[in-house]
Image (tube, rainbow, N blue to C red):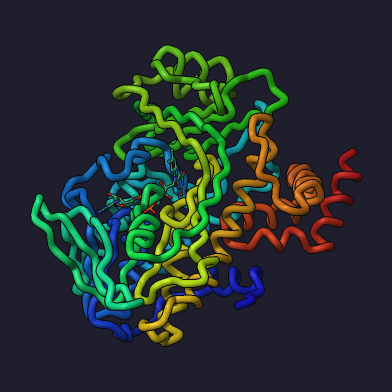
């Protein structure tokens, strides 16, 4: 099915959940109760009599948990994702703020590039800042309020088939094997999802997995935040590879409980900030003074590190044969270099794809091709943003997509123009926050505008 990516993306971004529930199946089973699984469950609650979320972690446990090892690291919610959360859960912002999330309107966000303020035009959309467990916990709270959604604490171990249709999930519930039956099964098991293995074991083809190796090293630490309402709540600073500093970037966000969450990242063998001393020293010496002021506060707990080897995507859409009654969402399909903050927003857009698909009244006894085609548009968009930026890093050596030289030249022109040209900056912000498709930047008028702005700036 050939779809215009820009149009599909625009429609997904404009879509709203149905006003009234329209059940078309008995039970939907979601494997993985993290952000992607919870958002899928929210959408499924409109179309199923009941929704069962299976996760190996107990949903009552708040805070960092083993099933989401990245949960201790700083998580940015892009304005595109925030917009979707507010649509899926009207009133989300107010409830989040009541639970400690901090509002991050455009005037409270600051960006630096190589030590200098970066974009003259900040993104004009709102967002929120909070720890990853807070954001995930808020979404879970909203989903579990839905009367037809329940959770089961169990480890999923495989699929149950009836011919070419998936009809359930095998589970291990505290050492006891069981089965959760469903008319639609959603894999939301994250980037380590075993779905490809399960398909292969049942005689289906595995999807091709594409990778871009980035070897990113994260370090995150919490500091006490004395100001209740600081002027800047989200501050980010990037270093281009041309600088001599081995820290690719750092950021600090105001989060719940009077804390600053501060992150530092490096690539390859650069592992900045692994000890408290190193973390504090670098914040003071290698970043604008605001970072030093945060570092002057009391550090709360230890520095938490995380190594992210690669971005990866599984091309389910390209399989000739795919079972009916099955879809995959979130990181299980594609996970990206986290510095671009796309994961939760991509998961929200996958949920919107699911909603659009289910509203089209599909026959669940046939493969969900329409869903896969919609989702491919979202995955392609996020993947192209993430990997084209990664390919500009000196240690990343491919794979290069067709037309890479031309597209990277065009990207460089547009990024340079964001510093001086309001129109280009606005368009660029909409793309990186996933409210517009990257192809909108490739329109001749946009590129010409950027070239003119760069000439004026010279
Ligand atoms: C270091 C780092 C920083 C990041 N920063 C950002 C950011 O700034 N902004 C952003 O939007 N995204 C960020 N991300 C990405 C973000 O964490 C994910 O995209 C987001 O959590 C959606 O993931 P998910 O729900 O698909 O999977 P996950 O969050 O990984 O959850 C998978 C779930 O599946 C469960 N599970 C797995 N296997 C089984 C099984 N067999 N049986 C039962 N349950 C199972 C797990 O317990 C878990 O709950 C970052 C990622 C990393 C690694």
Residue 441 at what x, y percent from top left?
A: 73, 58
Is 259 or 342 nearer to us in this picture? Answer: 342
User: Is 435 situated above or below 216?
Assistant: below
Dividing the picture into quadrants, the one containing residue 286 is top right
Q: Residue at point 20% right, 72% down? A: 181
User: Is 423 situated above or below 247?
Assistant: below
Q: Residue at point 55% right, 50% down? A: 210
Q: Is residue 81 visible?
A: no
Mark count = 0
Residue 307 horizontal side relative to residue 448, left or right? left
Residue 443 horizontal side relative to residue 431, left or right? right
Is 336 or 280 nearer to us in this picture? Answer: 336
Is 36 or 92 nearer to us in this picture? Answer: 36
Q: Residue at point 18% right, 59% down? A: 171
Q: Is residue 184 visible?
A: yes
Residue 41 at what x, y percent from top left?
A: 31, 67
Q: Quadrant of the N terminus?
A: bottom right
Residue 315 at what x, y percent from top left?
A: 52, 60
Is 11 or 134 nearer to us in this picture? Answer: 11
Residue 104 at what x, y percent from top left?
A: 48, 47
Dividing the picture into quadrants, the one containing residue 389 is top right
């Amino acid at each position: 099915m050939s779809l215009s990516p820009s149009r599909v993306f625009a429609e997904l971004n404009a879509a709203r959940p149905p006003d009234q529930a329209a059940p078309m199946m008995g039970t939907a089973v979601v494997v993985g109760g993290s952000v992607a699984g919870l958002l899928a469950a929210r959408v499924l609650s409109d179309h199923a009599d009941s929704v069962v979320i299976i996760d190996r972690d107990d949903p009552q446990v708040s805070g960092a948990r083993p099933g989401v090892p990245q949960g201790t690291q700083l998580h940015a919610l892009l304005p595109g994702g925030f917009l979707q959360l507010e649509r899926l859960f009207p009133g989300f912002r107010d409830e989040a703020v009541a639970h400690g999330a901090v509002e991050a309107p455009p005037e409270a966000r600051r960006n630096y590039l190589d030590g200098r303020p970066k974009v003259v035009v900040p993104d004009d959309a709102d967002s929120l800042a909070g720890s990853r467990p807070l954001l995930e916990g808020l979404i879970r709270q909203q989903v579990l309020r839905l009367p037809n959604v329940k959770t089961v604490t169990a480890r999923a171990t495989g699929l149950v088939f009836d011919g070419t249709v998936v009809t359930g999930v095998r589970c291990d519930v505290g050492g006891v094997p069981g089965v959760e039956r469903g008319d639609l099964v959603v894999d939301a098991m994250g980037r380590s999802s075993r779905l490809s293995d399960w398909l292969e074991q049942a005689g289906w083809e595995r999807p091709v997995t594409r990778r871009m190796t980035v070897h990113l090293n994260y370090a995150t630490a919490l500091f006490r935040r004395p100001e209740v309402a600081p002027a800047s709540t989200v501050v980010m600073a990037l270093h281009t590879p041309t600088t001599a500093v081995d820290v690719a970037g750092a950021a600090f966000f105001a989060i719940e409980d009077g804390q600053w969450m501060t992150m530092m990242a490096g690539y390859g063998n650069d592992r900045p900030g692994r000890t408290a001393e190193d973390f504090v020293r670098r914040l003071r010496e290698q970043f604008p003074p605001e970072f030093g002021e945060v570092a002057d506060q009391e550090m709360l707990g230890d520095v938490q590190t995380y190594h992210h080897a690669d971005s990866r995507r599984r091309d389910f859409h390209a399989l000739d044969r795919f079972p009916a009654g099955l879809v995959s969402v979130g990181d299980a399909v594609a996970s990206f270099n986290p510095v671009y903050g796309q994961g939760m927003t991509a998961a929200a857009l996958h949920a919107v794809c699911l909603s659009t698909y289910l509203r089209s009244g599909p026959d669940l006894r046939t493969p969900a091709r329409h869903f896969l085609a919609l989702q491919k548009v979202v995955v392609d968009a996020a993947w192209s943003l993430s990997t084209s930026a990664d390919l500009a890093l000196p240690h990343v050596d491919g794979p290069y997509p067709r037309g890479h030289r031309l597209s990277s030249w065009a990207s460089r022109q547009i990024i340079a123009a964001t510093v001086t040209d309001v129109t280009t900056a606005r368009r660029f912000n909409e793309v990186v926050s996933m409210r517009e498709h990257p192809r909108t930047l490739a329109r001749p008028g946009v590129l010409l505008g950027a070239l003119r702005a760069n000439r004026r700036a010279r």
